[in-house]
Image: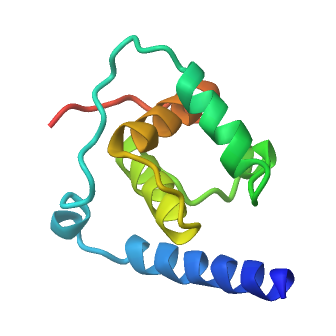
């Protein structure tokens, strides 16, 4: 049963990601607000990520793959929000921002643009 659930969630995420990749630029910019690049501690994001994401479905290889889907910081923020929603995590907007900031600092190294 758990394997079926994980397969369903994975397929749901893949289909949503593919649909998000096809959005026109104007609709993609209507995504959740981009987090500003402040010198915040990355510890809250690291703790949330390691306890909630790594244990459920992600490993660091996902973030360093040459075929990764995330192309910029806004997209990363959207992916974190989508994963939190799909996995029924009761995260606040600040939690999503903390995890996105941690992943960006640790793996992606995207420049962060303020809107």
Residue at position x 58%, y 35% in the image? 103
Q: Position of residue 73 (x, y in %)?
A: 40, 41
Relative to 21, 4 lies left or right: right
Residue at position x 36%, y 37% in the image? 94
Q: Is residue 90 above or below residue 33?
A: below
Q: Position of residue 60 (x, y in %)?
A: 77, 42
Q: Is residue 112 above or below residue 37?
A: below
Residue at position x 24%, y 72% in the image? 24
Q: Position of residue 99 (x, y in %)?
A: 52, 37
Q: Is residue 36 above or below residue 17?
A: above
Relative to 53, 12 lies left or right: left
Q: Nearer the viewer, residue 103 or 49?
A: 49
Q: Position of residue 87 (x, y in %)?
A: 59, 67
Q: Would you say residue 83 is visible in this rendering?
A: yes
Q: Quadrant of residue 4?
A: bottom right
Relative to 9, 42 lies left or right: left
Q: Quadrant of the C terminus?
A: top left
Q: Nearer the viewer, residue 23 or 55?
A: 55
């Amino acid at each position: 049963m758990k394997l079926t659930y994980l397969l369903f969630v994975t397929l749901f995420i893949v289909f949503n990601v593919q649909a998000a990749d096809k959005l026109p630029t104007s609709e993609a910019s209507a995504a959740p607000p981009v987090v500003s690049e402040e010198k915040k501690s990355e510890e809250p994001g690291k703790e949330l990520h390691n306890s909630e994401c790594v244990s459920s479905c992600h490993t660091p290889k996902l973030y360093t793959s040459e075929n990764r889907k995330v192309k910029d910081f806004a997209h990363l923020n959207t992916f974190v929000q989508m994963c939190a929603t799909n996995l029924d995590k009761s995260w606040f907007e600040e939690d999503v921002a903390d995890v996105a900031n941690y992943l960006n600092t640790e793996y992606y190294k995207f420049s962060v643009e303020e809107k």
